[in-house]
Amino acid sequence: MLQAIRDKVTGWIAYGIIFLISIPFALWGVNSYFGGGELPPAAIVNGEEISARDLDQAYANYRQRLLQLFGGNIPASFGSEVQLRSQVREQIIEEVALRQYIEDRGYRIGDTALGGIIRGMEAFQTDGRFDPELYQAQLRSLGYSPLMFEADLRRSQALEQFRDGIVATAFTLPGQRRLYASLASQSRKIRTLGYATDPASIEIGDDEIEQHYLANPDQFKTPEQVRIEYVELSLDKIKQAIRVDPAEVQARYESNLAAYASPEIREASHILLKAGDDDADAVRERIEALRQRIVDGESFADIAREYSEDPGSASAGGDLGEIERGVMVKDFEDVLFGLETGELSEPVRTGFGWHLIRLHAVSGGELQPLDAVRATLEDEIRNERAEGQIYDLVESLANLAYEQPDSLAPAAEQLGLALERSDWFSRFNGDGIAAETRVRQAAFAPEILQQGLNSEAIELGDDRVVFLRVHEHRPPQQQPLDAVSERIERQLRRARAQERNLKAGTEALAQLKSGKSLEAIAAEWSAPIRDLGFIERNQAGVDAALSAHTFQMPKPGADPEFAGVTLADGEFAIIELSAVRTDTASDESAADALVEATAGADYQALIDHVTRQAEIVRTPLDELEG
């Protein structure tokens, strides 16, 4: 839907990347959401700008994925917001530089190959066959035109060509494969001993809480928030108000009868005698003789088994099964669909040779009655009218919002539209209309937030259009100490407990390396020794940090090796490594994994090289804040 709007409304360019295009590039072909803007570009790569808004969207998407992955709280180990934004920007820079490199070297995909890929996508198929109407509908639902989708798909396939060339040339030596296989299949025998201080046992004074609060004021600010006024236009709501004349439905049905007939299916058999230009006449005489024998009463199937030169059907008596139009070559098909049931054709010449065709049965081709398709036709008519109406409304609303840029109320009143108001929301989170990423981005754009202007049309993914303006703005505010003191106390307790665990563990490691036994340390700590036996890399049920550290330890000699690692919950774990066992049997899967890893490393090395060679200008992140 909304294609007419997309073609005509200035500055309305869809964001987002279609799920079907499996590429890492999140920003190819995506332009600035509004026509201007005061922020400098986030970066410039070989003269091509990456807008601050593009960075905001990529960062918002990345942050949202992290929140979902970690249950709503991003671990501190991922770094600050500034560090995360910087990492996202570097990823975008790499993507743009690589795309430029690929395009400069002429990686392309032709129209025929592109069409084959699209027709082969299950999302665009009905009953296993490409459905042009479904294709158009799917793209519309994602806010894409075929031109945009095909352009992105061309770029993704160019990337695949390039990447495949790198991956296909990756290789490893036999010695490397054997070594990798032995390391991959290695297991290590360990015992562990943990030291964990209960954070609740640690006393934190009020002065410590206040000192931490004063030393880290940015950690205890409320997020910047806004409330917006908005007008929403929905294709579904407009459709519901449209009444369709039954006479119009009848007329549309009668003008498109072919569209409401089921495909005609014909069951047939054939006999093929292969022929070229030199022997075409001689082969025709032979097939005419076979036809006469069939006319005289001999079995078509028996003659097909004996004489047909079609390896796919001869053994089945020439049976071709069910055939729809568009499956066979045209000359063959024209004759087949002109036969009556039971009729034997005259000899038919195609590029394969001479054929005799017998039609066995005909099914399908039935016309659906009007009542069976009435609802579909009514919906089509409503869609067409609704698209026209919503285009007119969007155009009118855009003009009125521009003429009175500091309020949406006059425009909404003149057009009879509801002016709604949101709850408070931040740049990264919101409910209701603010759950839409594009709405949040628009609300915090400088011209909207700082200048109080109405937005341009914002297209959402399910045939909805929104115009908005900021109604109220709440800057970041320092939270009072009383509101955050409990959180600070928990933080300090965890940090103090981890410090104690590390101190005790470090002292114990020194004693172990001086000859003290693990059992003696366990007795002092009143903690059990956990005998894990031989563990494999990434073994289920074993802490990931513990496993990783174990496989970094040197191979033990006559005496065990000891090491320590702080786990995610703050516990300090001592590791006793006493034996290493290697499976010397050939491991083809491990060898394959090495080749794959080598290919990935080669590919990343090339990306790094391309990025280093590019001319890149980065705007300081603090200058990109709206």
Image: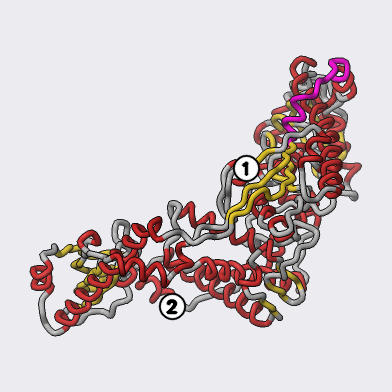
Q: Amino acid at mark 2?
A: Gln
Circle 1 residue: 422
For the N terminus, the quadrant is top right
Q: What percent of the width, then of the height, locates residue 437? A: 63, 51
Would you identify the image quadrant in which residue 55 lies? bottom right
Q: Amino acid at mark 1?
A: Ser
Q: What percent of the width, then of the height, locates residue 336? A: 83, 29
Would you identify the image quadrant in which residue 531 lies? bottom left
**Does any portion of residue 443 appear in the rendered image?**
yes
The residue segment tinted magenta is 234-249
| Rendered residue at 75%/68% (across/down) | 107
Which color mode does the image show? Answer: secondary structure
* Residue situated in front as seen by the camera: 83 or 274: 83
Q: What percent of the width, then of the height, locates residue 242? A: 80, 24
Name the element at disc 2: helix
Circle 2 residue: 176
